[in-house]
Amino acid sequence: MKKQMTIAYDVHSGLYLNLTNRCPCACTFCLRQTMDSVGNSGGLWLEHEPSYEEVIAAIDSCNPDKYTEVVFCGFGEPTERLDVLLQVAAYLKENWPDKKIRINTNGLGDLVCGEPIAEKLKGLIDVVSVSLNTPNAEEYLKLTRSKFGMQSFDAMLAFAEACVKTVPEVVMTTVDTTISHEEEAQCQAICDRIGARYRIRPWED
């Protein structure tokens, strides 16, 4: 794999921030299983995890007028760098106050950090997008290959439910090529129960 320091990159109207390559999952459908980059990002495999100062420098080199939102999403799970993520989010709230701040996450941040983290997102994060993937715990583990094992599915649901109470918008997603329409209906029912919005996303999105 080719390594470089792509910290900030564009996707549609969003500025995406790549904080880490660490992830507790190895999802069968993950783009990083087969490629080094997304869109015009260049390589997303990092030479090292960027410091807070490096992330801010990358943000400051961008024109905020180009973007409607800032998204914590790269070739890794953003909550692996929760402290830096929260610091950067606070900077954005102060300096880019009109931009939505979103986290794209596998929802395993409580297990990653060893404590519940939804409350820490309050006032800093506007949207949390959680990869639901499937309505079934066994199938979830087959798809995600989470290092945390069978507890992962319930932990992901608990995180999403907690975020509904602390974050303005919670979205739960599945990939359109990975499950059946019947399973999608079951995922919709889960989202309805939790209070999240359900989104079926294209594989390449």
Image (cartoon, grey):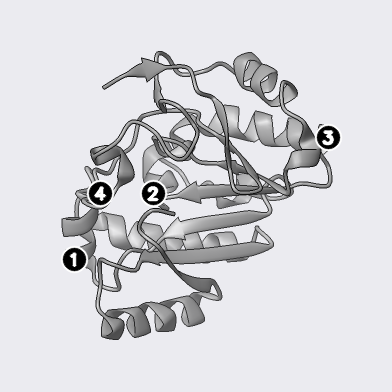
* Element marked by disc 2: loop
Foreground mark, 1 or 4? 4
* Residue plotted at (53% across, 46% down): 117
Q: Give the distance between the C-alpha atoms of the residues marked 3 and 2, in whole angstroms.
A: 28 Å
Label 1 neighbour load within 10 Å: few <14, some 14-19, many 20+: some
* Element marked by disc 3: helix
- The three-letter code of the residue at mark 3 reads Glu
- The three-letter code of the residue at mark 4 reads Cys
* Residue plotted at (50% across, 28% down): 19
**In x, y percent, where is residue 108?**
38, 49
Q: Compared with residue 38, is residue 62 higher up or lower down, i.e. above or below?
A: above
Reading the image, the residue beneath label 2 is 108
Quarter holding residue 168: bottom right
Q: Compared with residue 5, is residue 86 higher up or lower down, i.e. above or below?
A: below
Of the residues under marks 3 and 2, which one precedes in the sequence? 3
Of the residues under marks 3 and 4, which one precedes in the sequence? 4
Of the residues under marks 1 and 2, which one precedes in the sequence? 2
Which of 180 and 106 lies nearest the eye of the viewer?
Answer: 180
Of the residues under marks 3 and 1, which one precedes in the sequence? 3
Reading the image, the residue beneath label 1 is 139
Q: What number is the disc on residue 159?
A: none
Reading the image, the residue beneath label 3 is 94
Label 4 neighbour load within 10 Å: few <14, some 14-19, many 20+: some
